[in-house]
Structure formats: C-alpha cells, structure tokens
Amino acid sequence: MDLDIVLLSRLQFALTIMVHYLFPPLSIGLGAQMVIAEGMFLRTDDRRWEAIARFWTKLFAVNFAVGVATGIVMEFEFGTNWATYSRFVGDVFGSALASEGIFAFFLESGFLAILVFGWDRVGPKMHFFSTTMVFTGSVFSSVWIVIANSWMHTPAGYHLVDDGEGHVRAEITDFWAMIFNPSSMHRLGHVLLGAFILGAFFTMSIGAYYLLKKRHEDIAKRMVAVGLIFGALSSVGILVSGHSQARAMARNQPAKLAAMEGHFHTGEGPTDLYLLGWPDREAEIVHFGIAMPGMLSFLVYDDFETPVPGLDQIDDEDEPPVLIPFVTYHVMVACGMYFIGLTLLGCFMLFRRTLWDTPWLLKLLMISVPLPYLANQAGWVATEVGRQPWVVYGELRTADAVSVAVGSDQVAGSIILFGIIYIALVVLWLVVMNEKIKHGPEDPATLGPKTRGSVVEAATRLSLHDAHRMTHAEEEE
C-alpha cells in the first residue's frame, strides 16, 4: 500500500518537534527562576535562596541535556525529508540559524560549565552572572528560531531568484525586514511568556509537593511564592500578547484566524466569538457552539459592527484545515484563562497569609503542571496547522516542499525508529527528574563557603590540583 509521503513527512516532523518542544520552554522558564533565586541570594545573603538556586540548576542541567539530544534530529530532517523546502529557504534560515549559533549557542554553552560546576569554585557574583548568561542564551536561541519560523508565516525582506538549475529560492534583500517580519515580535513575546508560565508552574508544583509532604517547608514556601507571583504576571501578560497576536493575524493571515475561530461565513453584521463547539467543515457550522455575540469583531476591530472575513473569502485551494486549529486554539485559550484564575487566587491567598493552610489549593498547584505543557503544544499545533496548505505562506506549498528522493517506506520506518528513541529519552528524563525532585534541595546548613575566588583563580586552583595529583602518581610509581 502506497502511503502519502507528504503526510508521513509531516507526521515525522511533528513527532520530533513536539517531543523536542517539551524541553526548551522549561529551560527558559526554569532559567528565569534560577536568576530570581540567585538574585535573592545576593541581595539577602540568605542561604536558603542559594539552596533553591542549586536545586533548580540540577534540574536545568538534566532538561538542557535531553533537549539538545532531541533537537539534533530536526536539522537532518530538513535535508532528508524537506530538501525542496531547504533549497527555497536556505538563504533565510542560514542567516537566522547562524545568528543563533553566534548569539545564543556559544553564549549558553560557554557559561554552562560555570553554572553547573562552579558553585564551589567561583564567587557568588560570578556565578550569578554565569546563570544570567545561560538564561540569556536560552532566550536568544528562542528569538532566532521564532524569527525564522515567523518568516515562514509572514515572509518579508526577500525576493525570489532562479538558481540556474530550474529551482526558485528566496534570497534576503533586507536583513532587518526579515527579522522584524510582521508576525515575529508578536509571536516571540507569546512564546517567551508561555515558557515563563511553564517554569512558574513547574517550580510551584515542586514546592507544593514538598509542603504537602511536610518536607523542606521553609524553602518550599519560597518556591511557591516566587512561582505564583511570576506565574500571575506572565499569565496576565500572555493574555495581552495573545490579543495583539490575533489582531496581527487578522491582517496578515485571515484564513488562519478564521479556521481557529470556526468562522465560515463573513456575513454583514458583527462576528461572534465561539467559546466552545465542534466545527464541521462540510456543513460549515459549529456544532454545540457557545458564542459571545459580536465579540470577535470587537477584539479585532474595537467595535461591534465590522464583520471579520470568514473562510468563504478564501480560495478553496488555499483554505486551511479547521478542526485541528479550532480545537487546539481553544484548548490553549482555556488553559490560559485557568492559569490567570489559579495564579491570581493563589497570590490573593498568599498575601492574606492563608495559602499554607489551604491544602486543596496546594494540591491544585501540584497537579496543574501538565497544563502549561499542553498549552504550549496546543498553541504551536494551532498556528502550524492553521498555516496549511503553505509551508512558506503564499510562496511554497507544503505538498511541493518534500524531497523527491525519499520514499514513503523510508519515512515510515524512521518514524517508528524515532518513536522508540524519543520514548526512551522522555522516560529517562522523567526518571532522572523524579529522582532529583524526590531527593530535594540541599540543606542550607551543609552548603560550602560563600566566599570563593574569580574564574581565573578557580581555573588556577584546578590546574594546580591536577598537577599535584600527577606528581603524586609519579612519585608512587
């Protein structure tokens, strides 16, 4: 039986990128929590903050390592499964990914050793600086990836050229227009805030777990408090970011917005906003729909009169799927509203000093950590499926972007192989993270001395220590 090579290639890339995307948002969000904890340690000289920062650093290192391992595969997929696409966008992606290597990867990896192994070798200020640089590197990495991806949604600053072999490719004419394409900054803010929410819920869940188990209570209260405040600010912020992004989408990708909202017919009056429902593309209705009258018009145009263009304004061959974008978009929005309500309630009870005596809320904080993962995944699925049938919006269709030299049986076999490997990596990540979380942070009373030397002094001490060991070994021989 012949399988659809385009569908298989899309499934393979979806598998690898969705598994990989479990890890970068946590690296960014947890990195922000590490910076806060170390900053509080420098400000207050309270060793409990140092214990928290050390603990987050251990979890960060595990997450970072698995994230790197799961991300390598995608670089090869561009060449194996998507050679036509790679030829078309090579000039654009080459610039963005080179910038990521220069501004992000080297920054992040250059300070990672100090972050992980430098606690007892460099001073607190130098270690805080290293932590900040690793966090900054993780943010810069997301910046360039989002810019490259956003260009695929709203291409700008380019022209098309013939490569002399019968192929057309995009060539950058304005580097800054490519960077600040119409959707890049809107999407970047949304991605970073989503990562901050995940980091906040991750740290809150661990702190709440310790409080319910009556372990590390003094430290756990600080974990929950910081996570709640940071999570509340990020959750409110992402609501504003999402609104801004939706308005930009209405201008630049009206078909995607219509698919996400299940909006089939333009009409002559204001457009309703569906809160729930099940879209039926064939019947062009939303079954079991619960809608707010005129709200979509208000959110897009600031009035209750202007109709929002529906899918009937889009050529049939350019229409995106409706069911997947609609469902995943509404899952993301529902999660976002839940985050706002839960974190604001938690902050209210925190400042009322009743949070620690409310076990049901602590349990809710503990078990809610899967939802930010779900929201991050759902958001990406909604925006990527909503872009179809284009891989580069308006320029290159997904069906025309696959490699011609790869067969469907090869792609199907690699999906099975990657599935096994990725399942093993995720299980390994869960086991190691679970062990470290159950072990818990170190006792602040057992931490090493606070006063340490500079990076040069640490390297000198390490070199002298190695030289001493070599001399001692030679004497024994």
Image (cartoon, helix red, strand yellow):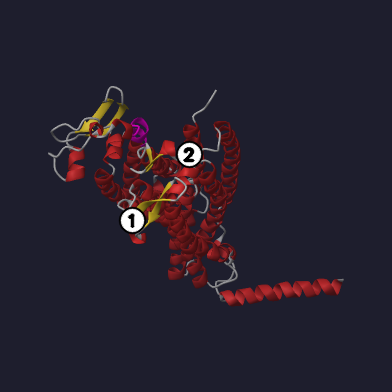
- Element type at marker 2? loop
Q: Magenta residues?
A: 320-328
Q: Residues within 10 Å of mark 1 (few under 14, many from 20)?
A: some
Is 324 one of the magenta-colored residues? yes
Q: Which amino acid type corresponds to the residue marked 2 in the rendered image?
A: Val
Eyeballing the image, is 421 above or below 108?
above
Q: Residues within 10 Å of mark 2 (few under 14, many from 20)?
A: many
Res. 157 mark: 1
Name the foreground residue: 139 vs 459. 139
Q: Residue furthest right?
A: 477
Residue 415 placement: quadrant: top right
Spatial separation of the CA atoms under disc 2 and disc 1: 24 Å
Give the position of the N terminus as an image quadrant: top right
Judging by the rendered image, the residue that carries numbered circle 2 is 402
Q: Quadrant of the C terminus?
A: bottom right
The secondary structure that most of the magenta stretch takes on is: helix
